[in-house]
Image (cartoon, rainbow, N blue to C red):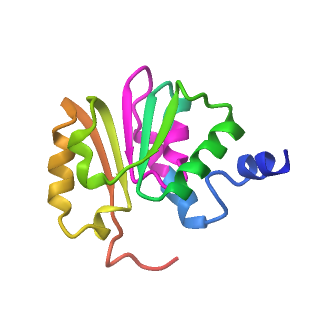
Amino acid sequence: MLKKLFRRLFFPCINFIAHKRMKFAKYFTKGAIKTLDVACGGGAFSIVAAKNGNQVLGVDYDERNIKVCYEYCDAFGVSEAQAKFQQFNIKGLHTLNDIYDQVFCFEILEHMMDDSAIIESISKITKPGSKLLISVPNLHHKPL
C-alpha cells in the first residue's frame, strides 16, 4: 500500500530529469491506437499512453524494468489489456507480430552501435503516417 502511494506521488520517479522528460507526453496521440515503447525502462511513458486510451506494448532488455512497469500499472490502475510489457532485445523489433500507430524511443539510441538499424526496424512495424517520438541527449545542453 505504501509502495503504491510512493509510486503515485513521485511519478515517474524521484529523478528530476525523468520528470523533465514527461514534457514529451504532450505530443502523444490520444485514443484507441497501438503504441510501442522501445526500451521502456520503468514504463512511465507507457502508463501515460495507456491512460490516454492507447493499447501499449513496452519492451526493454532488462527483466527488472519489466517488473517495475507492472508495479506502476498496479499503482495507477492500468490493466494488462491497456499495457503489456516484455523483455525483448530491441535489435529484433522487426520481428514483433504487430503494426503500431505510435512509437516512443526515448534516451536509448545513443547506447546503440547501429542506431540506424533500430530506426529501420521500427519502420517495418509502423503504418505509413505513424508517429515516431525520439529523444537523445544533447551534447551542448547547458546543465541546470
Percent position of residue 38, x then y: 36, 49
**What residue span does the magenta drawing correspond to?**
23-48
At 51% across and 55% down in the image, what residue appears? 63
Name the one closer to the observer, 134 or 56: 56
Name the one closer to the observer, 52 or 92: 92
Q: Quadrant of residue 78?
A: top right
**Is 105 contained in the magenta span?**
no
Name the one closer to the observer, 62 or 58: 62
Percent position of residue 1, x then y: 84, 44
Which residue is the extreme one toward the right? 2
- Residue 108 is left or right of residue 113, and the answer is right
Percent position of residue 129, x then y: 19, 30
At 53% across and 24% down in the image, what residue appears? 81
Q: Quadrant of residue 102?
A: top left
Which residue is the extreme one toward the top? 32
At 33% across and 71% down in the image, what residue appears? 138
- Residue 41 is left or right of residue 97, and the answer is right
Above or below: residue 102 compared with residue 3 = above
Q: Quadrant of residue 123?
A: top left
Percent position of residue 59, x then y: 41, 47
Marks counted in the figure total: 0
Name the one closer to the observer, 124 or 16: 124
- Residue 130 is left or right of residue 18, and the answer is left
Above or below: residue 91 compared with residue 125 = below
